[in-house]
Image (cartoon, helix red, strand yellow):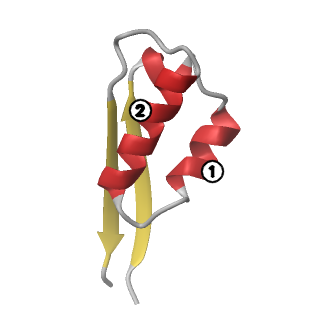
Amino acid sequence: MASTDRLLLCSGGLSSAVPGELIQDTLRSSNDPEEVADRLITLATDHGGPDNITVIVIDVRNTR
C-alpha cells in the first residue's frame, strides 16, 4: 500500500483569509488534489480573500 503526503503551497490570499483548521479540513476532504485546490480558492474568495489567491496542492506518494 502506498502512503501519501499532501503539500500545500499558497499565497497570503488563502492563508490570511481562511482559518488554518478549515484549510486542514479541506486538504483532507478529497483524494483529488485539483478538486481540493478549487475548494480552497472558493473558500478564500468566500472569506474575503484579496484578488491574489494562489493555491498548489501536491500529493507525494511513497510506493515502498
Residue assigned mark 1? 25
Residue assigned mark 2? 41
23 left or right, relative to 59: right
Helix, strand or loop at mark 2: helix
* Residue 1 position within the rendered picture, expressed as x and y whole percent measured from the top left: 40, 90
At a point 66% along the width and 29% down the height, the residue shown is: 19
Q: Nearer the viewer, mark 2 or mark 1?
A: 2
Measured Cα–Cα span from mark 2 to mark 1:
14 Å
At a point 49% along the width and 15% down the height, the residue shown is: 49
Q: Residue furthest front?
A: 46
Amino acid type of disc 2? Ile
Quadrant of res 28: bottom right
Relative depth, front residue between 15 and 46? 46
Quadrant of res 37: top left
* Residue 9 position within the rendered picture, expressed as x and y whole percent measured from the top left: 37, 34
* Residue 24 vertical placement versus 20 (above, below): below
* Residue 43 vertical placement versus 37 (above, below): above
Relative depth, front residue between 33 and 2? 33
At a point 46% along the width and 38% down the height, the residue shown is: 40
39 left or right, relative to 19: left
